[in-house]
């Protein structure tokens, strides 16, 4: 069988298995769907890895029903819908398969699945993500985006608890609005280019150059994808949804779903909009600023959280901001860094959400203050959380370290400083929680004492080793040396832009400097050595700190009306940036 | 009305519908009303898409009793609208199902009263 015939199988397999499981759930023994789901995710991972390997020799393409661009006999008119595996897209699809496998193992016995609904929804989710990676058609991309959203909405609401329902409601409203924006953008771009095929659109855009309708289309599609990728000021839904979703689902949300949206945007910018100077100016200007603002604000907010899943959610937002700065830089090296960062961060964040899930199952809470000292003796989760926190904070080892090195190469010094501070804040926040829970070390709680929290628990009757094994496996994978994937990344970053480009040679990521890690440990020490303020000056400082963090918390109110208002503000920001460009 | 202002009309209607829907979502005091407002926002995209595909003086894109090549409106955008109506129905159904469950568990459907995570109890301070 040729690889191009296998391309649609990567999507059809999880879709077909999900349908079959749903139809047969009543008759199957309860364990069978779990085994089938794990095997399907593994098969998708293997298949996409095979496609990634093959696409190094040139892109693998499949046109559905044989509607190739030549079939219409009119040059420039593409009626068919195509899938295309370039190394980057196929590798990310394989990464999704891997993360789903780990999450399915982690979720073994989590749900009392009489009818396997959890596994059906998860497989639909996987199919949508793989389709999102592999498609080369804008409307098709929108359809996978929608399928991904709908599966995610249902999975968030799955436990049917109070918080889960309310979080899912906010999540659904904001992300449904985002998909309307994306549909409108699809229409606008079609109006100017007359096609949905990425390559044909790119040629049309290069011919017409800057055009207000094209810019409008870009603004709408970027707002939609940035909402999914939780970039300031579109980010407010994420912390609620990630904090209330079941842990195995949060693993996928934080590890793959949100960063995949950013990858989609990077692909669109590289393949469709690179010929439009006005759009590229927006990417280099506004998106860079948004990324930096997101990293800083979310890093600070993450540091002031006490609910572990909410803390991790804000850390995800901060790291998405960091990834957006690489997207805005747009060089080949930065793109390679972005691709590796998506994978490295996904592995780490997946493992950390699993640790939160273990604590919810074994100790009935995810609140670091309630859990103080309760994790003694749980060495496996402690190890995963400690190493994960260090990697977020800039440990000079592993995939994230190499990725940061390549993303940094072209960045300006102030931007580098903000990125370092943001990742140190998130790393220190995770390590502080780990020190409190597993070591019983603590200073007086700071602003995190006032953060929102919840009393909840997750189903407990699973052996610890079954939950710890996938988390530790993800951490070990994230520690892999970035040198091993360098040649592949060079090819992937170049071919994301144009399949005919030669592979990039990336600069070797050395040991790097220890500033980020030092900053992380300094912030951790600050949090753990904190003492009650007695004197006048320190009381004043505490008061100011409390007020400013209180304002940050108030921004994340949990009310859907506020969130939608901020989305409108984001759109207005884009409009202002466009107007500013037109004026000068 | 001049031709220019006429061709701008669908764009203005779409923008107006979207803005009205957003206003409704932001100020809504009932979840079901909020879902309705979301549908208004969605209709804005339909108006926009149909406006894009419209060709003056052209017929429907059905060539059963016309020779191929007769001017017709763009069938592609209509296909997009049709696809999205299906997805939109699924989203609305899901939201209404969530609303029913919220009502069962919280006894209220006021979005201003729903917050996923609450501030910590004051006893912990």
Image (cartoon, coloured by chain):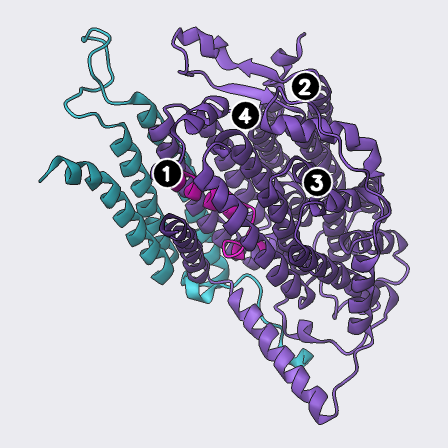
Chain colours: A purple, B cyan
What range is drawn magenta here? A214-239
Label 4 to label 1, Cα distance in Å?
19 Å
Looking at the image, is mark 4 or mark 2 nearer the viewer? 2
Q: Nearer the viewer, residue A213 or B93?
A: A213
Which badge, 4 or 1, is on the more N-terminal residue? Answer: 4
- Determine whether A316 is above or below A528 in the image: above
Is A525 a magenta residue? no
Asked if labels 2 and 1 share a chain, the reply is yes
Label 3 to label 4, Cα distance in Å?
22 Å
Residue A488 percent across, percent down from the top left: 75, 27
Q: Quadrant of residue B69?
A: top left
Asked if labels 4 and 1 share a chain, the reply is yes
Q: Residue furthest front?
A: A584
What secondary structure do most residues of the magenta stretch adopt? helix
Callout 1 secondary element: helix
Identify the residue under disc 4.
A135
The answer to the question of whether label 2 and label 1 lie on touching residues, with beta carbons closer than 8 A, is no
Residue A33 percent across, percent down from the top left: 68, 30
Q: Left or right: where does residue A129 sit relative to residue A535?
A: left
Res A36 seen here? no
User: Label 3 is found on which chain of the structure?
Assistant: A
Q: Nearer the viewer, residue A31 or A218?
A: A218
């Amino acid at each position: 069988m040729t690889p191009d015939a296998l391309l649609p199988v990567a999507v059809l397999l999880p879709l077909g298995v999900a349908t079959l499981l749903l139809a047969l759930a009543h008759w199957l023994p309860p364990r069978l769907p779990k085994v089938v789901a794990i095997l399907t995710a593994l098969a998708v991972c293997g298949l996409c890895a095979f496609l990634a390997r093959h696409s190094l020799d040139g892109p693998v393409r499949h046109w559905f029903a044989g509607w190739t661009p030549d079939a219409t006999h009119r040059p420039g008119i593409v009626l068919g819908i195509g899938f295309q595996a370039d190394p980057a897209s196929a590798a990310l699809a394989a990464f999704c398969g891997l993360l789903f496998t780990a999450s399915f193992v982690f979720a073994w016995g989590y749900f009392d699945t009489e009818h396997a609904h959890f596994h059906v929804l998860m497989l639909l989710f996987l199919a949508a993500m793989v389709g999102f990676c592999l498609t080369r058609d804008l409307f098709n991309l929108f359809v996978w985006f929608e399928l991904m959203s709908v599966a995610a909405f249902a999975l968030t609401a799955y436990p049917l608890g109070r918080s889960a329902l309310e979080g899912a409601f906010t999540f659904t409203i904001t992300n449904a609005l985002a998909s309307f924006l994306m549909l409108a953008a699809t229409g606008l771009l079609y109006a100017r280019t007359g096609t949905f095929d990425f390559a044909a659109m790119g040629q049309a855009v290069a011919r017409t150059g800057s055009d207000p309708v094209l810019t409008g289309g870009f603004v709408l599609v970027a707002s939609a994808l940035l909402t999914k990728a939780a970039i300031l000021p579109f980010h407010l839904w994420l912390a609620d949804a990630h904090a209330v979703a079941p842990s195995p689902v949060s693993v996928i949300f934080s590890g793959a779903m949100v960063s995949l949206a950013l990858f989609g945007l990077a692909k669109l910018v590289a393949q469709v909009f690179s010929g439009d100077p006005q759009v590229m100016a927006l990417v280099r200007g506004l998106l860079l600023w948004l990324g930096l603002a997101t990293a800083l604000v979310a890093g600070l907010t993450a540091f002031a959280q006490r609910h572990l899943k909410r803390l991790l959610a804000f850390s995800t937002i901060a790291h998405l901001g960091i990834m957006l700065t690489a997207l805005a830089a747009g060089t080949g090296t930065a793109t390679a860094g972005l691709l590796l960062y998506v994978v490295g961060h996904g592995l780490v964040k997946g493992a950390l959400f699993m640790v939160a899930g273990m604590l919810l199952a074994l100790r009935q809470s995810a609140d670091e203050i309630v859990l103080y000292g309760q994790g003694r003796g749980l060495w496996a989760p402690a190890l995963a959380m400690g190493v994960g926190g260090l990697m977020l904070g800039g440990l000079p080892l592993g995939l994230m370290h190499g990725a940061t090195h390549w993303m940094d190469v072209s960045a300006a010094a102030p931007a580098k400083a903000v990125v370092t501070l943001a990742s140190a804040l998130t790393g220190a926040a995770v390590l502080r929680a780990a020190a409190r829970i597993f070591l019983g070390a603590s200073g007086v709680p700071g602003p995190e004492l006032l953060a929102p929290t919840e009393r909840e628990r997750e189903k407990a009757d699973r052996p610890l080793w079954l939950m710890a094994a996938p988390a530790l496996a993800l951490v070990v994978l994230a520690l892999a040396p970035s040198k091993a994937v360098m040649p592949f990344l060079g090819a992937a970053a170049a071919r994301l832009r144009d399949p005919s480009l030669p592979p990039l040679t990336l600069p070797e990521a050395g040991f790097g400097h220890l500033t980020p890690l030092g900053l992380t440990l300094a912030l951790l020490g600050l949090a753990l050595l904190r003492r009650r303020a007695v004197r006048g000056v320190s009381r004043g400082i505490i008061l100011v700190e409390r007020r400013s963090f209180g304002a940050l918390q108030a921004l994340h109110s949990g009310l859907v009306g506020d969130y939608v208002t901020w989305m409108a503000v984001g759109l207005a920001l884009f409009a202002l940036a466009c107007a500013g460009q037109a004026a000068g | 009305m001049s031709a220019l202002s006429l061709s701008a009309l669908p764009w203005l209607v779409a923008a107006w519908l979207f803005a009205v829907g957003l206003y409704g979502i932001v100020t809504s005091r009932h979840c079901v009303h909020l879902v309705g407002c979301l549908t208004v926002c969605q209709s804005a995209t339909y108006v926009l898409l149909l406006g894009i595909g419209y060709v003056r003086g052209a017929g429907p894109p059905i060539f059963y009793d016309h020779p191929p090549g007769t001017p017709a409106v763009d069938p592609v955008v209509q296909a997009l609208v049709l696809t999205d109506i299906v997805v939109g129905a699924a989203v609305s159904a899901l939201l209404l199902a969530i609303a029913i469950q919220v009502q069962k568990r919280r006894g209220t459907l006021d979005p201003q009263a729903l917050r996923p995570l609450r501030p910590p109890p004051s006893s912990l301070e």
